[in-house]
Image: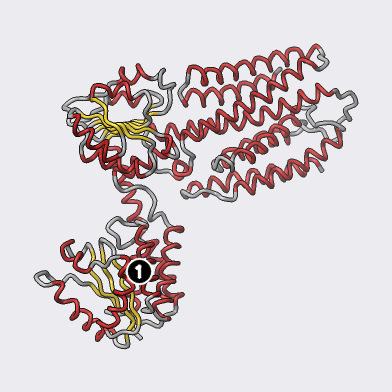
Amino acid sequence: MELVCLGVNHKTAPVEVRERFAVGTTKLGEAAQHLLEMAGAPEGVVVSTCNRTEFYLVAENASVALTNLQHSLAEKVHGHEEPFYHYQQRDAARHLCKVVSGLDSMLLGETEIFGQVKQAYQAAHEAGATGSILNKLFQKAFSVGKKVRTQTSIQEGSTSIGNVAVELAEKIFGHLKDSEVMVLGAGEMSRLTAQALVSRGAKSIIVANRTHDRAVELADEMGGRAVRFDEWLVELKNVDVVISSTGAPHTIIHRDEVESLRRARKYRPLFMIDIAVPRDIEHSVGEIEEVYLYDIDALEQLAEEAKVRRVNQIVECEKIIEEELEKLGLTFTSSQ
Amino acid sequence: MDRWFLIASTLLAAVAGLRGLLILRHGNMSRWTVFWMIAVMACQMGYLAVRGEMRGACPLRSIGEISVFLAWSLTLFYLLVGPVYRISLLGVFTAPVVVIFQGFALLPGRLVSNPEKVMNTTFWGETHSAMSVLAYGALALAAVAGVMFLVLDKQLKEHHLKSGLFRNLPPVRELLVSLERLLWLGMVLLTVGVIAGVLMPLGEDAIAHLIAAVGVWLGYLVLMVTKRVRGITGRRFALGAVALFVLSLGVFAFV
């Protein structure tokens, strides 16, 4: 028996091609059964996420199964260059382990893929589309995925500005359920950052924008409340996190304004995120003892450092994968 | 026998601290620190049992005995507070302090081999000694939490966020809450200790000691009331807790 993997992903195909291969989570079992028919194979699993669709097969003859499958899928790629990649034998097993470990993801080291592959495997298993080889392979891939995440730093650190902001907010306030957030400026960056904080349980969101209607719109979207732009200083008394991203050509938050509220705030920690260019918050605000001020450069640098740290972990992850594939003991020969 | 228990306990604390720091350098959290500290505590209990038997009273009669009792109290509060507030990193910071106190007690001349049996104990005298040293255990742990806060605050202010220590330190707010609770606990115990000190029969040399104790108590009271009523920055609160603890140790070393 031979192992084959055929797939399209974000590296080989644009979204308009990937979407043609996408399979809903409720249809994964059905898709696995259909795969067996298309390829004439006894075992198969279909993995489908927003960035990839992959077909894993066990067949008597890998080349024949691959040809059958490509032939069946040909009409879906009509008008586009060949978007498929394929692996056989040990290379296919290695690829699955990389996928499960997040090494092949758009966002290196992301963890969501682990659950998505697990779901795909379970659906195929329940549909009776898997057998002893794929069962063994996928179980191994899951244990490799866990090992890679626990023994390396591949998933550590945030790689987007929104997530860096959330990570820092959690480092300052712990659970965000007791934290109030104020958003100054209703642009896309502040929306994304605020959304990241809300998704982690921030207690409430206050939005202030020069165009009040935009503030109301964003506040409604976030389940918060809008205030007039000239009222932000009054609101600052109660908030824990400030996200500022206005289009103002000069600073709008000054040291003396923040200083004037310290007593009323009882000197509680204040996390200020300035993602505006030009900056909204006077640099010296960060010199106030209880204020933690981060501008766009600082956040981008942290995100970049996390990316570099993750890239530096790839070799270590691949070493673990190779060691585990050795232990797997499937008698695959290396393919071209 | 008491000395062997103390040596074992000090070595275990040294291992707990070093091991925790090494693991921390690799960016991970030592899950076993709490168990090492339980072993430290067990040996400390062995020491206290043997030494207490030798004295026929609570072993708090010499600077060496007070140091060990303080280390025991610090370990006790770590074990009570650390795991509850998910700040087990506190153990990595606590272990070196335990080593310092117990190492000091192990210096030649600090713990005599055959201590005198205590004949004239009084209830208030024993209560004063025990409660005061327990209070300093809680206040020492508050100082440790204060140091942790200061480290985290500096890293956050200067955007130095890459170290394993940063990743494993508990959040700022959690540290400040723990610090405040430990200070209140220490204050309550110290209050009982000071009241018992006023009620116990006082020799001439005890007056200065009691005045110093009241002075330290007032220092902590000002810090706590300021925090509660007026508010104070985390940095000043933590610095206050550390400074008051170091100051009180200095005072009692000489008074």
Q: Is A324 or A169 nearer to us in this picture?
A: A169
Specify the quadrant of the image occupied by residue A254: top left
Query: Which percent across, then down, holds residue B130?
Result: 75, 28
Residue at the image position 80 percent from the left and 32 percent from the top: B59
Task: Determine the chain carrying the residue at label 1.
Answer: A
Residue where numbered disc 1 is placed:
A120
Specify the quadrant of the image occupied by residue B47: top right
- From the image, which quarter does the C terminus of chain A lie in? bottom left
Label 1: few (<14), some (14–19) or many (≥20) C-alpha neighbours in 10 Å: many
Q: Residue furthest left?
A: A79
Q: On screen, B77 above or below A143? A: above
Q: Is B19 or B126 nearer to us in this picture?
A: B126
In the drawing, does residue A203 fall left or right of residue A248?
right
Q: On screen, A46 above or below B63? A: below
In the drawing, does residue B2 fall left or right of residue B23?
right
Query: Which percent across, then down, holds residue A192?
Result: 26, 42
- From the image, which quarter does the N terminus of chain A lie in? bottom left
Q: Is B3 or A93 nearer to us in this picture?
A: A93
